Image (cartoon, rainbow, N blue to C red):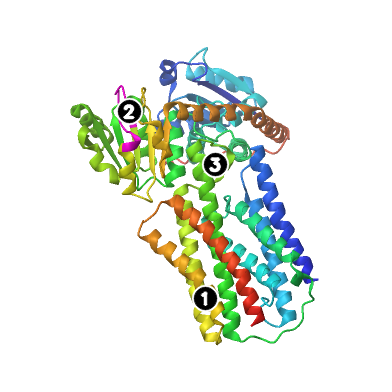
Amino acid sequence: MERWFLNASTLCFLVGFAYTMFALGAGVARPSRWNFLVMLTGFICQTEYLHQRGEIVGRCPVTNLFEVLVFLSWSVVLLYFVVGGSYRLSLLGTFTAPLVFLIQTLAQLLPSASLPAVRKVSAGFWAELHAAVSLMAYGAFALACVAGVMFLVQERLLKRRQLGSVFQNLPPIATLVAATQRVMLAGFILFTLGLVGGFFAGSARTAIVMMAVSVWLPYGFILILRQTHRYSSRRFAWLSVVAFIVALTSLGALSFLHLNQ
Amino acid sequence: MHVVCLGLSHKNAPVELREKFAIGDAHIGETAVQIAREPEIGEAVIVSTCNRVEYYVASENAAAALAVLTQRVGDSTAFQKLHGAESIRHLFRVVSGLESMVLGETEILGQVKKAYLTAQTAGATARHLNKLFQRAFNVAKEVRTKTSITRGAVSVGSAAVDLAEKIFGKLDHCNVMILGAGETAEMTARALQSRGAKAIFVSNRTYERAHSLAELLGGRAIHFDAWEREFDSLDIVIGSTGAPHAVVSRDKIEPLMQRRADRPLFCIDLAVPRDFEAGVNDLDGVYLYDIDALQSIADASMQVRRAELTRCEEMIERHVAEFSEWLATPRPTMPMKTQTEDGK
């Protein structure tokens, strides 16, 4: 039964994305509350899925890569609602929806997706907190990446003077840079807390710690350099995208190492 | 009950005639009450703006109401006389911006709302006009949100302002520099000021001219050979000099931009020949729009608006039919709100 909710949420994100793209293409409507409702429905379905899955496995449902990716998608949407505040009705949802759809589809294609959920031994409070907070940090990094992509699109349209409906509906570039910076900082703080939680959770293998630090350090550098105005907004937007790709790759490796520890 | 409209607008009357019939804000409520108290008329709202003077009244006898109104305003062939569905349609078109000088402008909605509130507060309206104007505001909202009739900028100045907002968001932290002292540059600077631009600097080869324009705009004049010193604090630069060559080259801007890595610069080139080298747009964080680019934005927006006309009219027609049906339904008359002697 719980899988039904996951499929429903995946469908919601696909529909939300497709509708907005159609509306923008036709140039007849702006992204509206309708998108917000679709995103909200998708989020409710995701939450219910994770709740039911958590009940079955008896702990935070991040026990295999499939669950990790679903939890990550949930974090992205949660942060979209919490941090996205003023951009909720703009195209942020449109850009978030395809990312979440892709992550969830990828998750469902994994071999671990077909394994039946079974009750697991709790990894302990700190370990579960570490996993949940770290994944929420990845969610924030994903959202920073989305805002970065939006900046790059808007900047390109401005430079090329292509001022169509996508341009009209995207927020100002200054807002997008501020959003990228804010969400990335939130992700960095969460990731730091996750790391601290990891230390409390007990001895982790050096490879895992190194892998986590390899995500933490670049984001730290990007933020420090940004604060000291060392590079342009455009470069910052590109870095938010590249850093997320690196982080997502390392998430796969981290999950593999963690689950085999 | 019938709705009658007697009015003139920029479409059928020159400004000399419009100003003759215009009614000042202070007298609108009082005049509306006087008209509403005429035996042939029950309710009245007067809309008086720089582009139109219109009387909307509700009456059981449309012909008699029109005669009273015509007598009151004086006989003028420029006055358009509408009644029934025509007058309802006209009001819906007016509030939706379809009758405006600039198609789709939204200022008229605020002006009609104000006119209605004045009449309502004065006690010149009752059930029929209350219902009509509330419906009109809903129609305007629907037309604006469901079509693109208000989308985009339709003048060079407003196109520049819209672009500035797409770059900086709010303009209240933006400093603007005008190079030269052209008329379009002044209008653009004023438009930026109206959206909250923080400070205006004017630099011109003739310092006196820069000084007088700066004074006019409440800004600061700068000697032409010193404008680059202010560059670090600038967000928007408007070029409107009469120079026969580019005043701002890529080579000049590039080192200056490196000092302000994460701060964008919006260059508005209104000069012909152009003041900015085209290569400036290739620099990271610099957005250059010349007069042709801005004009084409304005033209494209106007085309979009014109293309939306039919959809707007279809929406309005539906509301006209619904309201006419409501108006034709017999119902017991309600006494109009009357004023007491002390005016309350």
Q: What secondary structure is marked by label 1?
A: helix
Q: Are marks 1 and 2 in contact (CB under 8 Å)?
A: no
Q: Residues within 10 Å of mark 2 (few under 14, many from 20)?
A: some
Chain letter of disc 3 in the image: A
**Residue that badge 1 annotates:** A210
- Looking at the rendered image, the quarter that the C terminus of chain B falls into is top left
| Residue for point 41% across, 16% down | B16
- The answer to whether one can see residue B158 in this image is yes
**Residue that badge 2 annotates:** B246
Q: Residues within 10 Å of mark 3 (few under 14, many from 20)?
A: many
Q: Which mark is residue A167?
A: 3
Foreground pick, B28 / A111: A111
Disc 3 from disc 1: Cα separation: 41 Å
Q: Which residues are magenta?
A: B239-251
Q: Nearer the viewer, mark 1 or mark 2?
A: 1
Disc on the earlier residue, 3 or 1: 3
Residue B339 relative to residue A118: left or right: left
Disc 1 from disc 2: Cα separation: 55 Å
* As drawn, B31 above or below A119: above
Q: Which mark is residue A96?
A: none
